[in-house]
Structure formats: C-alpha cells, structure tokens
Image (cartoon, grey):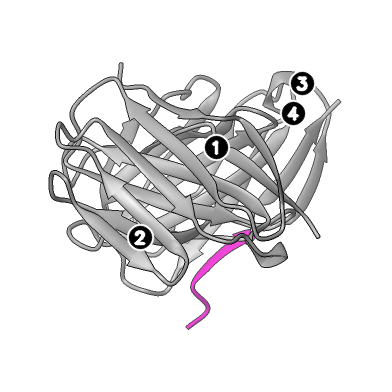
Amino acid sequence: GQQVMQIPQYQHVQEGEDFTTYCNSSTTLSNIQWYKQRPGGHPVFLIQLVKSGEVKKQKRLTFQFGEAKKNSSLHITATQTTDVGTYFCAGLKTSYDKVIFGPGTSLSVIP
Amino acid sequence: NAGVTQTPKFQVLKTGQSMTLQCAQDMNHEYMSWYRQDPGMGLRLIHYSVGAGITDQGEVPNGYNVSRSTTEDFPLRLLSAAPSQTSVYFCASSTPGSPYEQYFGPGTRLTVT
C-alpha cells in the first residue's frame, strides 16, 4: 500500500538556525499537503502543492514538490520559538482518495 | 460556525466494552475521516467517507466501524475495546479538490484498561 515517510523524526535547533524536513512517498502523488501540530493540539493545514516542481513560500516557510511528485520538503528560515511543533506531510493519489500522513518531524527550538 | 466538533474529549473504557466517538461538522464538507495518533506513529487513517452513504477503509480499520447517514455526522464505533486501541482520535473534514484543506477536530483521548 501507499507509504509516506519523513526524515528526520526529531530536530533540535538553536533559535535563528534553519530547519528542513523531507517527505517521501512510495507512489506518485496527485498532491501533497503540509500540516503543523502544536504540542497538545490538533493538526492545522499549512499548504497544498499540486504541480510537479512547485515551490511555495509563506513568510519564512518554503515548500517544494519534487519533479516526480514523489517527494517534498519544508524549509524554515531563521527558526523562532513559535515554530515549535510537529510537521506532517500528507499525500493523496487522487482528489477523492485517502489522505495518508507521514510520521512527522518534531521540531524543538532552543531560545 | 463551530467547525469540527468531537465528543467526548476524554474516555476510559474497560477491555471488551463498546462505545461510539462522535464527530460532527457544520461546513457542509463532503469528505470526512478518522485518524488515530500514537507516539512516533503520526496520524494513521482508520476510515474515511467521500459523502453521505459512502465509507471506505483506511490503513488501520480493524476493530472499528463507521457509517455516514448524513453529511454532518461521521461516528466511529469501537466494537470491543482492546488496550491496543488506547490512542488519541482525530476526526477531520474537507471538500475534495483544490485546495484540499482538512479541518481537524480537537480530538478524543481514549484509554482502554
């Protein structure tokens, strides 16, 4: 079945350092989504990528979708303590298909 | 709009008991899903529905039943609770297409002893 993997599992950074998490799917995806979950909270949608090679930015966050539509990355520039949480990618094979989440990358930011 | 609501917030069950986790949304979303979240495992899809009357299995459906009689409600039934079902359960809803933003409920923390 479809599998979505993420690395690293954990990342500890000093405030102001950059952070990147990588997402890989065993199958080609129609789109990929990214979510953030704060400790004790529920996942919150960040962005969706649809096109091969797509790059989107949200302030300090940069999202990329690979050319083969099987991998993606999230890069945070100059991390802040408000970035703390777990970042999940989630992939779909088609728009009406099941959404499969990766295991997430937990980010800690040391002030 | 209340968004996605889940009840109860916390529940303790004994092994073998059954119960229903409630999920409702007031956004007229077609797509609804149930996930369980365990430490280090991320969010695993239990069941999902693309519309009223239509349900399908996700990654970990065993031990759980769902039905979708209305657009608004998507209850999850535990038939005979087991300690392995101790987890945090999230319900989510969205309208398929682009964007495909899933809105999550606050979760139900279930402990099976």
* Residue designated by label 2: A47
Q: Nearer the viewer, mark 3 or mark 2?
A: 2
Residue B30 at least partly seen: no
Identify the image quadrant of residue A48: bottom left
Q: Look at 43% across and 35% down and name the residue there.
A: A22
Which segment did they paint magenta?
B1-7
Local secondary structure at mark 4: loop
Mark 1 secondary-structure assignment: loop
Separation of residues labelled 3 and 4 (CA atoms): 11 Å
Q: In the image, what residue occupies the spot 74% across and 54% down?
A: A40
Q: Amino acid at mark 1?
A: Gly
| B77 part of magenta stretch | no
Q: Which residue is mark 3?
A: B83
Q: The numbered mark 2 sits on a residue in which chain?
A: A
Q: Is residue B24 left or right of residue A90?
A: right
Residue underneath mark 1: A104
Q: Looking at the image, which residue is at 58% across and 36% down?
A: B36
Asked if labels 4 and 1 share a chain, the reply is: no
User: Residue under circle 4?
Assistant: B17
Q: CA gap, disc 2 to disc 1?
A: 15 Å
Q: Nearer the viewer, mark 1 or mark 3?
A: 1
Q: What is the C-alpha distance between the residues marked 1 and 3?
A: 24 Å
Q: Chain of mark 1?
A: A
Label 4 – label 1 distance at C-alpha: 32 Å
